[in-house]
């Protein structure tokens, strides 16, 4: 508030237990749970179990990647689950033209809805939460109208290869996810878009004054989030072998937000942690596995998730307050 | 709830002072906002509290209204020592405040705002809306405001909103009313109305603290004046004993006696009226309530200073030039080519660069590294097909960190961890790596230490010598007198006067600021 | 206790009167838009009711449809939306309500079967209140973002609901208590009891919002939390209490749902938080806080229910069309709000 004398040089070291916990908490938690399961969980250290852990986390990781970018701009995207449903609903409609056109259309729909979100946020200036809420409410409805509320079983070898195929024992979907993580990581680390999006989230006014194309950046970010959600929708549809717009992606917006927040990306924007987000999703997956394999229930998973979320934001809040 | 008589509360004895602040200090982290400041207000006194940005006015007000607890010193109210823990304590005691930003609930009706927190209630404990509205109508009419009190505040004009805030503050049985720049959004006739209110308050024994940067108002309504500067009290006395020049001197830290008259500038002046066409030509910027026909020219190699007090709209002027503040009319030409419409991106592309006044809010991206902050604006130039070249970036960063002597552990250090001076250098580096032709520098040396100040000033000289045009805003007269080739003095969004090379001195600038109304025709260059 | 102010004592202030003419002309169009925003839901409700009557005649207006299907079906959403209105007017959001509803339904059924109806209801509302209190404290005292806190609260409450029902494998039947069943299925003068309770809650909610000091503080917090605390208003207490009330109302809806269906379903109230938010926003509240009306919320709830009903009446339309229409409505309303705000900002 007053700037009459220069504040002292604050070269605060992020040392100490609390500091380490804030910065690396999610990695530590994942590592600890992993070791715990290796030691105490029967059959955990088998290729099948490990593969399953990854496979199950894949859709959430993909959606969370896009969510992390959106949150980095101080936004939020509640429409991702609905986009997954729309993607799923589109596939059977176009499968007659071949599997690639079908997947292509699904991805285009994702980008289109993302651009719509971007339009409302960047140009109209709506709050991201309400703009994407409208899509969440309407989008799944539209998907259900398109599919007439029905589950459509899909018998396409290429599609099921995407769901079940393996390369050197590694599931194709996992490989795809690795590629996507690397690509989004590249966008964040190396591209103009990545640099500018964190600047927009970190200080929108300063970004405008520095000539950053704020609107274009927001458009791109929501479009990317839509695209990634659609990819997740396609992957999950391929895995289930059926397009099921009523259930696919349900609550995924919440899972993705949880993964991002637990992974250390602040809701206030200006910072995106890609690897942290992946770890956040893995943490949730491991928590689930750990509880289930020790005779605890899904209800316990929800309660533990709640505590982890509060813990993660409280840690972050403490960091903000101390600086 | 509200007493009907106007006698001071408590024993009923006559107190010499309504409110007294004794030797109060307040620190925020390492920053001293108030340093041993004393302040007193008698019943029926209207006292001006004056100071430039960062003088400590806001902090002092917040100490007097229970928002901040002082680190040292004490507060006395109606002769007794008091501790105010919350704003509520202050209000209950009878200290009422009108904050600078109109802080009412804009979606609620005028009546509800007026009575927020102390609504009249029926016997059932419900808000008596009918009475509240009729009372509000009556109260507002006493202030000369004739509107439907049920209208939501945001649908009313700024003047009315401000009057509702004033009415809210004085319709309690306040003994002290603090007004923080109450006229900033008022039309002249509304100011007259407000003054009538203040006189009425004074006549009934209420003490008024009047914060303003408008000198006319201060001399028109205030009995006494307290001036703060850099967290210290630098003047305290009756208004009648101070003239405008003296007041400006106190605010800016230059008493008229010690003024160096027309000291030779350290710069070799560039003739402002030369045949050389202007690099930056700004004509007739106008925005309702903000800017009124502001024009200025900057030539290559020239430093044009923008002088004026707080509220003279210097920052708004450079923002309008840069396209960050929309204007209704006016034009900006760079090298004879008009920027229309002006947007920050277009201005940057044309070679304009703005260093904003508020480093934290509009400048740095605090959680990012020095590196990222420096290259933010230059990113498109460092990238090919959307991919940023790290090598070229690091090279650029290294060049500018060395050239501007930015002291940091590494280029990867977060900007929030740097000192103010180094943050400012980072922002300057951000502008300079765009190789701009005209720099708009808004208070480049504020809030940074002495060493960094000198470095920044030397850098400005160096850049001007290299052929850049510079617009320099500074509240430090010395900086303008020493460092500018031409000075434009602004007041209330108007050009109040200009000084050309050879005529620039602290005294001349102050004279224009202090006597704008009666002397502007004589001092124009 | 009239405010005999210093100014009044000194006589009315001399000088020219200040009328609000400076910005008046520019404001007229804004006011029209504001009117649409404020009363749009009511107008739309009237239109759909007329359209429904015109299209389907007695089938639509018959009490069996309007009262026992539309109204009875939306009473639970109405209760939840009343609490959500308070939360949203303070500028917050409560994602936990659907889960809290399920938790309360399950607890009410489970506890009433063992210890009777009074205990069942007390436990259910107590648990809901505790979740609300926890969320309120985290939001008001520790300043955590409402979105995240209530997202966690949602997981927590849903977790409890599943825990009590053995992961949903066990059907928890409500105690066989006459008056408890009456709460869910009974009628008074032909009006279903849940509808009656929702109407009473609506009346009280309206009164609190418009006619109590607490209600004024709710608006002030949403208008500007900083300003509200500078004015010395009890910001923390009221912020905490809106989350408690939101949870209690959701809890009450849960009890009624359990009473109506005789069981506590852990999946009850799924997605209801989003419907409630949509209803409140359609009813004219601003998600940024500071504005909203209980009557608008009620109209929003009714509108969503009537649209659903009309789509069902048509029969040939996919029932999923309802969500599309709701989403479209929501978007239309917020776009209108944005248009309003934008014109406001421009000089």
Image: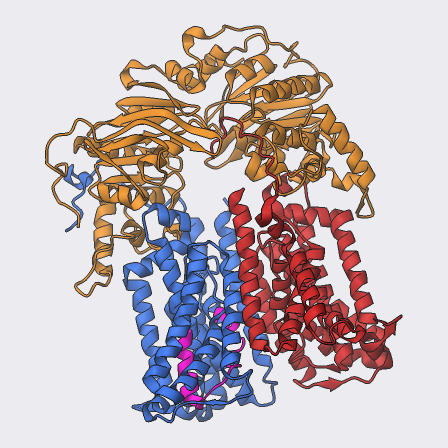
Chain colours: A red, B orange, C blue
Relative placement, left or right, of A30 versus B76 is right
The relative height of residue B85 versus residue C33 in the rendered view (above or below) is above
Magenta region, residue range? C249-278
The relative height of residue C300 versus residue A156 in the rendered view (above or below) is above
Q: Residue at x 66, y 9 (%)?
A: B268
Q: Residue furthest front?
A: A39
Say whether residue B515 is visible. no
Q: Position of residue C216 (x, y in %)?
A: 32, 58
Q: Residue at x 57, y 67 (%)?
A: A305
Q: Position of residue A106 (x, y in %)?
A: 76, 72
Q: Nearer the viewer, residue B2 or C117?
A: C117
Relative placement, left or right, of A19 versus A55 is left
Give the main secondary structure of the magenta stretch. helix
Q: Position of residue A122 (x, y in %)?
A: 62, 54
- Please state the total of marks drawn on the protein image: 0
Q: Position of residue A234 (x, y in %)?
A: 76, 73
Name which quarter of the figure residue B464 lies in. Answer: top right
Say whether residue B20 is visible. yes
Name which quarter of the figure residue B77 lies in. Answer: top left
Relative placement, left or right, of C10 versus B464 is left
The relative height of residue C85 versus residue B294 in the rendered view (above or below) is below
Whether residue C262 is in magenta: the answer is yes
Q: Nearer the viewer, residue A133 or C109?
A: C109
Q: Nearer the viewer, residue B108 or C215?
A: C215
Name which quarter of the figure residue A295 lies in. Answer: bottom right
Q: Residue furthest right?
A: A168
Whether residue C99 is in magenta: the answer is no
Q: Residue at x 59, y 9 (%)?
A: B265
């Amino acid at each position: 508030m007053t700037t009459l004398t220069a504040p002292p040089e604050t070269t605060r070291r992020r040392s100490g237990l609390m500091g380490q916990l804030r910065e690396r908490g999610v990695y530590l938690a994942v590592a600890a749970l992993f070791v715990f399961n290796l030691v105490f969980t029967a059959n955990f250290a088998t290729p099948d179990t490990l593969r399953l852990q990854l496979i199950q986390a894949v859709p959430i990781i993909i959606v969370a990647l896009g969510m992390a970018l959106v949150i980095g701009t101080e936004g939020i995207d509640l429409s991702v689950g609905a986009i997954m449903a729309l993607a799923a609903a589109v596939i059977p409609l176009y499968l007659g033209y071949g599997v690639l056109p079908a997947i292509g259309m699904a991805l285009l729909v994702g980008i289109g809805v993302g651009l719509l979100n971007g339009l409302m946020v960047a140009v109209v200036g709506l709050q991201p939460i309400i703009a994407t809420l409208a899509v969440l409410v309407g989008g799944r409805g539209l998907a259900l109208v398109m599919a007439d509320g029905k589950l459509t079983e899909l018998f396409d070898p290429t599609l099921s290869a995407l769901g079940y195929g393996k390369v050197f024992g590694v599931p194709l979907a996992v490989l795809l996810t690795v590629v996507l993580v690397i690509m989004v990581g590249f966008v964040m680390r190396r591209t103009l878009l990545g640099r500018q999006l964190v600047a927009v989230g970190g200080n929108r006014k300063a970004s405008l004054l520095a000539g950053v194309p704020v609107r274009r950046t927001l458009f791109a970010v929501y479009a990317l989030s839509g695209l990634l959600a659609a990819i997740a929708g396609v992957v999950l549809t391929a895995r289930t072998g059926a397009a099921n717009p009523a259930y696919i992606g349900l609550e995924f917006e919440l899972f993705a937000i949880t993964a991002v927040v637990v992974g250390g990306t602040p809701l206030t924007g200006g910072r995106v942690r890609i690897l942290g987000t992946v770890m956040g999703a893995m943490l949730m997956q491991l928590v689930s596995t750990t509880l289930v394999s020790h005779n605890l229930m899904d209800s316990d998973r929800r309660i533990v998730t709640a505590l982890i979320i509060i813990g993660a934001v409280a840690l972050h809040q403490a960091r903000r307050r101390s600086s | 709830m509200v007493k009907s008589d106007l006698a001071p509360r408590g024993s009923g004895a006559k107190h010499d002072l309504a409110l007294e602040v004794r030797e109060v200090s307040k620190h925020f982290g390492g920053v001293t906002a108030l340093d041993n400041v004393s302040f007193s207000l008698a019943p029926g006194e209207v006292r001006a509290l004056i100071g430039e940005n960062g003088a400590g006015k806001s902090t002092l007000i917040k100490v007097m209204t229970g928002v901040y607890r002082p680190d040292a010193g004490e507060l006395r109210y109606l002769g007794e020592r008091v501790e105010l823990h919350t704003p509520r304590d202050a209000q209950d005691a009878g200290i009422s405040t009108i904050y600078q930003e109109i802080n009412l609930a804009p979606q609620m009706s005028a009546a509800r705002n007026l009575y927020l927190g102390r609504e009249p209630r029926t016997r059932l404990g419900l808000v008596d809306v009918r009475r509240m509205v009729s009372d509000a109508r009556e109260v507002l009419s006493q202030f000369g405001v004739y509107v439907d009190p049920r209208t939501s505040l945001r649908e009313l004009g700024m003047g009315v909103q401000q009057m509702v805030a004033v009415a809210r503050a004085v319709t309690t049985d306040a003994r002290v009313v603090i007004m923080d720049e109450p006229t900033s959004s008022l039309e002249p006739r509304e100011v007259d109305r407000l003054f009538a209110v203040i006189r009425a308050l004074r006549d009934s024994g209420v003490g008024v603290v009047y914060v303003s940067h408008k000198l006319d108002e201060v001399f028109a309504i205030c009995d006494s004046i307290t001036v703060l500067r850099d967290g210290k009290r630098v003047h305290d006395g009756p208004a009648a004993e101070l003239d405008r020049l003296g007041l400006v001197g106190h605010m800016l830290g230059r008493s008229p006696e010690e003024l160096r008259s027309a000291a030779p500038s350290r710069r070799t002046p560039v003739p402002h009226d030369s045949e050389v066409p202007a690099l930056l030509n700004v004509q007739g910027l106008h925005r309702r309530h903000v800017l009124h026909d502001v024009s200025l020219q900057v030539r290559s190699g020239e430093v044009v200073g923008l002088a004026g007090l707080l509220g003279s709209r210097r920052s708004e002027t450079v923002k309008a030039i840069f396209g960050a503040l929309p204007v209704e009319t006016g034009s900006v030409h760079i090298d004879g080519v008009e920027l229309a419409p002006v947007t920050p991106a277009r201005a940057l592309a044309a070679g304009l660069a703005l260093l904003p006044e508020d480093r934290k809010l509009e400048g740095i991206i605090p959680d990012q590294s020095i590196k990222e902050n420096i290259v933010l604006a230059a990113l498109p130039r460092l990238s090919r097909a959307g991919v940023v070249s790290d090598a070229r970036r690091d090279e650029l960063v290294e060049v500018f960190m060395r050239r501007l002597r930015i002291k940091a552990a590494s280029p990867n250090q977060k900007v929030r961890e740097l000192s103010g001076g180094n943050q400012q250098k980072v922002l300057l580096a951000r502008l300079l790596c765009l190789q701009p032709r005209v720099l708009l520098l808004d208070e480049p040396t504020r809030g940074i230490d002495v060493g960094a100040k000198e470095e920044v000033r030397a850098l400005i000289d160096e850049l001007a010598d290299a052929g850049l045009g510079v617009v320099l805003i500074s509240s430090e007269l010395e900086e303008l007198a020493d460092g500018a080739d031409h000075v434009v003095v602004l007041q209330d969004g108007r050009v109040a006067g200009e000084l050309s090379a050879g005529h620039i001195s602290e005294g001349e600038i102050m004279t224009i600021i202090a006597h704008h109304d009666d002397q502007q025709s004589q001092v124009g260059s | 206790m009239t405010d005999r102010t210093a100014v009044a004592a000194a006589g009315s202030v001399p000088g020219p009167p200040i009328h609000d003419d400076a910005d008046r002309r520019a404001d007229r169009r804004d006011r029209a838009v504001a009117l649409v925003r404020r009363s749009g839901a009511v107008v739309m409700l009237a239109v759909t009711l007329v359209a429904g009557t015109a299209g389907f005649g007695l089938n639509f207006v018959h009490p069996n449809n309007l009262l026992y299907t539309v109204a009875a079906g939306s009473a639970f959403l109405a209760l939840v939306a009343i609490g959500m209105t308070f939360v949203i007017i303070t500028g917050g959001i409560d994602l936990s309500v659907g889960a809290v509803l399920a938790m309360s339904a399950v607890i009410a059924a489970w506890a009433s079967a063992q210890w009777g109806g009074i205990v069942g209801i007390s436990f259910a509302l107590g648990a809901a209140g505790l979740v609300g209190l926890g969320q309120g404290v985290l939001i008001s005292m520790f300043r955590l973002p409402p979105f995240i806190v209530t997202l966690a609260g949602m997981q927590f409450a849903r977790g409890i609901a599943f825990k009590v029902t053995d992961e949903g494998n066990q059907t928890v039947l409500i105690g066989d208590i006459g008056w408890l069943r009456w709460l869910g299925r009974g009628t008074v003068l032909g009006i279903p009891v849940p509808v009656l309770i929702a109407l009473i809650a609506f009346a009280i909610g309206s009164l609190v919002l418009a006619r109590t000091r607490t209600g004024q503080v709710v608006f002030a917090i949403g208008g500007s939390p900083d300003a509200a605390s500078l004015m010395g208003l009890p910001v923390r207490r009221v912020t905490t209490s809106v989350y408690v009330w939101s949870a209690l109302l959701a809890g009450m809806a849960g009890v009624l749902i359990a009473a109506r269906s005789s069981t506590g379903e852990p999946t009850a109230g799924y997605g209801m938080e989003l419907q409630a938010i949509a209803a409140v926003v359609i009813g004219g509240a601003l998600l940024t806080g500071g504005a909203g009306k209980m009557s608008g919320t009620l109209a929003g709830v009714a509108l969503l229910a009537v649209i659903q009903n009309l789509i069902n009446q048509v029969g040939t339309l996919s029932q999923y069309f309802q969500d599309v229409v709701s989403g479209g409505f929501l978007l239309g309303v917020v776009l209108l709000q944005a248009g309003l705000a934008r014109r406001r900002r421009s000089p």
